[in-house]
Structure formats: structure tokens, C-alpha cells
Image (spheres, rainbow, N blue to C red):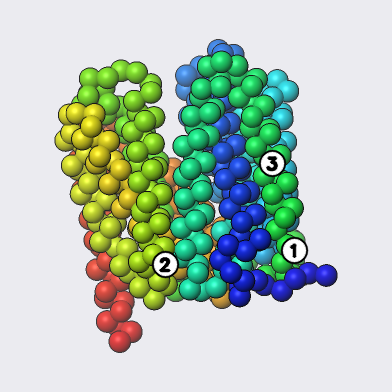
């Protein structure tokens, strides 16, 4: 028999521990597999333009499946949904490991990741109380960032030694994630018995989109998180061009290390948000969002490795402090209105659309021949102005409701 929601359980319950462990292993596999797959297609002499196509195929699955994965997460016990999603990832990694088409295998992993995301965030609202939800999100983000760091390093280092070994580690990580999912008690489905007609599911999804975008609090969260993750992906690619120009270093390792500084900072920022911000005080994260843009401007002007490391750690701290409370707010209000799974699916659609749009705009600016340092400064200024506009809009909304 299904267990009731475990919102009253201690934060580090059996369920929460299993979720955090499974998330770490699954994210570790995702990031190790990316670098292993890139090494494989390079070894197989695919053209250079095929490398970003690999990532685009992954992101596209989130957008295409957005109308369906939220209902999938809310119609079944979310722990079991996470298990099925990790099995899909395991299958995709096995396809690549077996020597079949890496694009096919990585797309299958993307399908698993798209199904996994609404369940992994939606389950937090079912196993943590409102007061614990920001802390639970902080733990989730910290475990994810740790997995990104370790997975990226492991995938790249092992691929230099043996691509097959790197792929094998990914298969093992996904298998261990499936095992961890098994230890999550079977929770009551949030919204069972919904229609599985694709047309009706699509209408339901876009109805959920409308509901969330019409609600001031969830719209605030959706805009903020979409801006953050779109900017984060753009910054990752900006670093690749910035390092040779600003630091005079032409290796592949330095941009990766700089990205790692941001990830380390996010861990500390997420922890600070968990301690200092509650659902009732989410608006406190907005100054950190504005400061992210200012810090990026400062970073673009750096000319030494040490100062670049320091500034990017600060960018990461501000980022973690900014995004974690917004995630918690969306989960809390989305669970009440459209279901946590649907809310996260809508969020994924917004974030991945923002990623594609920002990367497209970034590519156009680079193609136009703009100087890299100027791009960095402009990027930081635009982001700071965007968050300032969000802050002003939030204050105006509060005054209207007063």
C-alpha cells in the first residue's frame, strides 16, 4: 500500500537521503558521459560542428517532452518515476558503450533526464515541510554541483586514458542511481488518474503554463530561474573565448577550471540561502541576482588567473543564493496549483528555451566580430538590468496587492 506524503519527517529522513544520493549519482553520470561522448565522437572523426549538436539534442528533449513529463511525475510515485528515468539514462549510456550511434544514445539519456527533472524536484515538496523546503533545495543543488565537478573531471580524465572505461563508469553510476531510487518509500501519487491522450496532455500542460504565468509569485520564480540558467550556459561558452584573450592561455583545461570555480561558489551560496532565506522572504535573493551581473562585468576586466578564480567563486556564491529560493518558491506554489511535477516541467521549458535563445544571441554577437571582453561586459550589464527590472516589477506587484 502507498505511504502518505512524508512532509512531517525529519529533513534527513530515509527518503531524503536516498533522493540526494540518487541525484548525485545520476548527475555524476550525466556530466561524465558528456565528456566521454565528446571524446568518442572526436576519436571517430565526426566534424567539429557535431559537438554542440550533441548538447542541443539533449536540451531539445526537455522542450519536446515538456507537455508530458510533468504529468508522468505527478501520476505515479515520484521515487519510481526517478528510477524509470535513471533506467533510460542507463540504457542510453549502454548504447554508447556498446559502440552504437553516440547521438542516439545521448538523446536517450536526454529523454531520461527530461523525465527525471520534474520528479527529483517535485519530490522535495512531498518529503520536506514548508520550513525545510529551502534547505532541501540547498542540499539538492549542493549535491548536483558536487556531481558536476567530480563527474566532469572523472569523464575527461578517464577518456584520456580509455574512452571505454569512461563510458563504463557512467553505466555504473546510473546503475547505482537506480539502486538508490529503490530505497525511496513509495509515496502517494500527487495527481493520479489523469488522461494519457497526447492532445489532452498538451492542453493540460499549456493550461498549467497559463496558471503559473498568471500567478505573480510563480511568474517571478519562472522568470528568475530562466534568466539564471540561460546566463549560466552562456557564461560557460564565453569563458572558452575569454581565456585566450584576457589571460593569454590557449589550453582546454583553464576554462574548465574557471567553470569549476563557479560551481564551487554555488555550493556555498546554496548553503547560505538555506540558512538565511525562507519562503516568506524569497525577495531577499534579488540583490544577489543584480550583483551577479556586476560581478561578471568585473570578471571580464580581469587579467590574472588568481583574481579570475576569486571573482568567479563570488559569481557562484551569488548564483546559489539567488536561484535556490526561487526553486523552492515554485515547488511550494506549484504543488498547490498544478502539481509539483507539472510546475517543474513548465520551469524546464522556460529554462531550456532561455538557454537556446541566449546561446543563439551570443553566437550572433560573436559572428558579428564583437570583442570578447566587450561581450563579457555587455553580458553582465544586461543581466544586472534584467534582474533589476524583475525586482522593480516585484515591488510594484506588492504595492498593488497591499
Front residue (pair 254, 353): 254
**Separation of marks 2 and 1 at Cα, in angstroms:** 31 Å
Q: Examine the rendered structure and indicate whether residue 282 appears above or below residue 301.
A: below
Q: Secondary structure at mark 3?
A: helix
Report x, y in % for residue 15.
65, 61
Identify the residue under disc 3.
176
Mark sitting on residue 222:
none
The alpha-carbon separation of the residues under discs 3 and 1 comes to 18 Å
Q: Left or right: where does residue 341 sit relative to residue 178?
A: left
Quarter containing the C terminus: bottom left
Q: Residues within 10 Å of mark 3 (few under 14, many from 20)?
A: some
Q: Secondary structure at mark 2?
A: helix
Point out the tag, 3 or 2, that comes first from the N-terminus. Answer: 3
The residue lying at 83 percent from left, 70 percent from top is: 1
- Residue tagged 2: 219
Q: Which residue is mark 1?
A: 186
Q: Give whichever of 258, 228 is nearer the camera.
A: 258
Mark 1 and mark 3 in contact (Cβ < 8 Å)?
no
Disc on the earlier residue, 2 or 1: 1
Q: Residue at x 61, y 60 (%)?
A: 16
Residue at the image position 53 percent from the left and 16 percent from the top: 160
Horizontally, residue 206 falls left or right of residue 388, namely right
Q: Nearer the viewer, residue 111 or 5?
A: 5
Amino acid at each position: 500500500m502507498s505511504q502518505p506524503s512524508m512532509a512531517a519527517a525529519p529533513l534527513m529522513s530515509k527518503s531524503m537521503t536516498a533522493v540526494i544520493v540518487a541525484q548525485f549519482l545520476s548527475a555524476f553520470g550525466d556530466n561524465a558521459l558528456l565528456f566521454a561522448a565528446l571524446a568518442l565522437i572526436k576519436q571517430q572523426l565526426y566534424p567539429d560542428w557535431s559537438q554542440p549538436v550533441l548538447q542541443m539534442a539533449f536540451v531539445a528533449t526537455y522542450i519536446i517532452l515538456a507537455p508530458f513529463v510533468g504529468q508522468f511525475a505527478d501520476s505515479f510515485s515520484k521515487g519510481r518515476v526517478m528510477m524509470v528515468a535513471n533506467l533510460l539514462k542507463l540504457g542510453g549510456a549502454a548504447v554508447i558503450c556498446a559502440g552504437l550511434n553516440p547521438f542516439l544514445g545521448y538523446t536517450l539519456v536526454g529523454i531520461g533526464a527530461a523525465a527525471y527533472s520534474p520528479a527529483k524536484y517535485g519530490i522535495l515538496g512531498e518529503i520536506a515541510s514548508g520550513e525545510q523546503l529551502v534547505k532541501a533545495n540547498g542540499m539538492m543543488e549542493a549535491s548536483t554541483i558536487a556531481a558536476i565537478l567530480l563527474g566532469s573531471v572523472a569523464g575527461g580524465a578517464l577518456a584520456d586514458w580509455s574512452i571505454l572505461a569512461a563510458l563504463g563508469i557512467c553505466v555504473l553510476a546510473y546503475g547505482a542511481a537506480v539502486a538508490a531510487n529503490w530505497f525511496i518509500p513509495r509515496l502517494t501519487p500527487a495527481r493520479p488518474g489523469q488522461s494519457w491522450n497526447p492532445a489532452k496532455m498538451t492542453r493540460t500542460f499549456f493550461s498549467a503554463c497559463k496558471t503559473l504565468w498568471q500567478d505573480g509569485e510563480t511568474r517571478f520564480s519562472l522568470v528568475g530561474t530562466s534568466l539564471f540558467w540561460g546566463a549560466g550556459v552562456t557564461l560557460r561558452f564565453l569563458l572558452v573565448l575569454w581565456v585566450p584573450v584576457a589571460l593569454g592561455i590557449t589550453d582546454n583545461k583553464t576554462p574548465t577550471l574557471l567553470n569549476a570555480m563557479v560551481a564551487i561558489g554555488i555550493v556555498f551560496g546554496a548553503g547560505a540561502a538555506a540558512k538565511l532565506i525562507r519562503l516568506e522572504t524569497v525577495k531577499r535573493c534579488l540583490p544577489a541576482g543584480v550583483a551577479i551581473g556586476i560581478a561578471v562585468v568585473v570578471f571580464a576586466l580581469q587579467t590574472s588567473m588568481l583574481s579570475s578564480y576569486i571573482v568567479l567563486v563570488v559569481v557562484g556564491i551569488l548564483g546559489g543564493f539567488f536561484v535556490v529560493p526561487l526553486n523552492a518558491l515554485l515547488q511550494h506554489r506549484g504543488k498547490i496549483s498544478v502539481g509539483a511535477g507539472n510546475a517543474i516541467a513548465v520551469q524546464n521549458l522556460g529554462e531550456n528555451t532561455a538557454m537556446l535563445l541566449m546561446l543563439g544571441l551570443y553566437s550572433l554577437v560573436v559572428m558579428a566580430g564583437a570583442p570578447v571582453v566587450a561581450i563579457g561586459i555587455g553580458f553582465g550589464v544586461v543581466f544586472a538590468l534584467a534582474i533589476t527590472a524583475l525586482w522593480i516589477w516585484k515591488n510594484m506587484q506588492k504595492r498593488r496587492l497591499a
